[in-house]
Amino acid sequence: QTETNHGGPEEGESLTSRLPTREGWWKPFVFFQGFWLTPEVARSTVLVQAQFRPRADDIILATYPKCGTTWLKALAFTVANRSRHLVASHGHPVLTSHPQDLVPFLEVPHRELHPIDELEALPSPRLLSTHLPCTLLPSGASTLGCRIVYLCREPKDVLVSTWHFMNKVRKDFHIDLGKAFEFFCEGVSLGGPFWEHFLGYWKWSMEEPGRVLFLKYDEMMANPAEHVKMLAEFLGVPFTEEEESAGVVEEVVRLCSFENLKSLPVNSTGVSDRVGGLPMENASFFRSGKVGDWKNHLTEEMARKLDCIVEEKLKGSGLSF
Ligand code: A3P
């Protein structure tokens, strides 16, 4: 077989040039298999679908962008690796590595050399992450029995967080909140419509609760310790009674808290280029870390409109915010 039917660059180029296109946040977005993506992410998705080989014991952290990916990566890494890295140890990797670097993404736009080989080289069980909607995951992810932890968030906060982030990391671009709001309400944001992204994983978690753990940022913020225990059970490494009475759960919560992560030099200084061609300040992943920050940005009318859209789109699903 040639490279082109393996999701290689040529196939990606010709495919994205044939897709429906419309104005996106900072460049035109393409409509790929039911979702709005940048052409680069669409190409990366084609490659992942064609070349990434899921393993039955993979754990995939799936999120809609700006729903708390960085936090979930820190928590899942800490919980899953606590026999190797004691939570309270001075040399814990969370103290010296940005959480984004502790768990690799499946899809990586821009990079010329896609790290599929790097993913292949990881020992099992792998902890991986993705922003892909569930219907865009490589088919083996559902047939082989990989486990998924999905994290979503109250949509008005997702919009505000995305708006701040995009204006911060893209130096050549500025979008005003009114325009960002319009796009978001139309379902046009990276991986949007966000409601389809949420609903895909929500329905999957209803059908296979043992395979898909569905979490909400807002609930996690309200009760992080309970969620850390839930996460540990789901990952197959529940806390022992000894650990619980020694306060390990609270230690995980503290280590991965917004305040602690934001204050660490590895997260508060420096610039990293994780996607290839787009260096970002490490600190840009830690902004306010609050539930309900939308109140400081959206008008009542905007909030009402977005709430109506969300209610309508999620109607009958059992998912609500
Ligand atoms: P805000 O912009 O509302 O502050 P992602 O990691 O998916 O890009 O999401 C980023 C959002 O998660 C940002 O929200 C960021 O501040 C928040 N965040 C980052 N680390 C966090 C933590 N440890 N606890 C809670 N929220 C966190």
Image: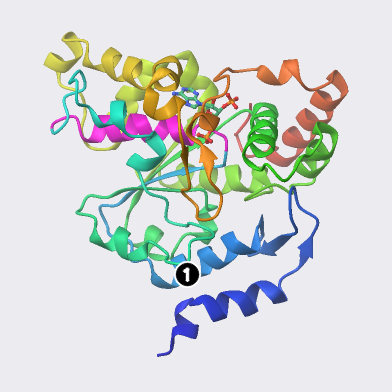
**Residue drawn at (44%, 73%), measured in percent from left and top?**
50
Span colored in magenta: 66-83
Q: Pinpoint residue 294: horizontal percent, then vertical percent.
A: 71, 21
Horizontal and vertical percent position of residue 39: 64, 64
Magenta stretch encompasses residue 259:
no
Q: Is residue 196 left or right of residue 268?
A: right
Q: Which residue is mark 1?
A: 47
Residue extending farthest to the front is 270
Name the dominant secondary structure of the magenta segment: helix
User: In this picture, is 210 found above or below 113?
Assistant: above
In this rendering, the answer to whether 1 lies above or below 199 is below
Q: Quadrant of the N terminus?
A: bottom left
Q: Residue at x 67, y 49 (%)?
A: 192
Instruction: Report helix, strand or loop for mark 1.
Output: helix
Q: What type is the residue that disc 1 sits on? A: Leu
Query: Residue 160's image quarter?
Result: top right
Note whether 34 is above or below 216 in the view shown: below
Residue 72 lies in the magenta stretch: yes
Going by the image, does 160 lie left or right of 238?
Answer: right
Residue for point 47% across, 36% down: 69
Q: Report the front residue among 64 and 145.
A: 64
* Residue 134 on image: x %, y %: 51, 54
Position of residue 30 measured from the top left corner of the image (x, y, whole percent): 70, 63
Q: Nearer the viewer, residue 70 or 231?
A: 70
Q: How many marks?
A: 1
- Scheme by which the image is coloured: rainbow
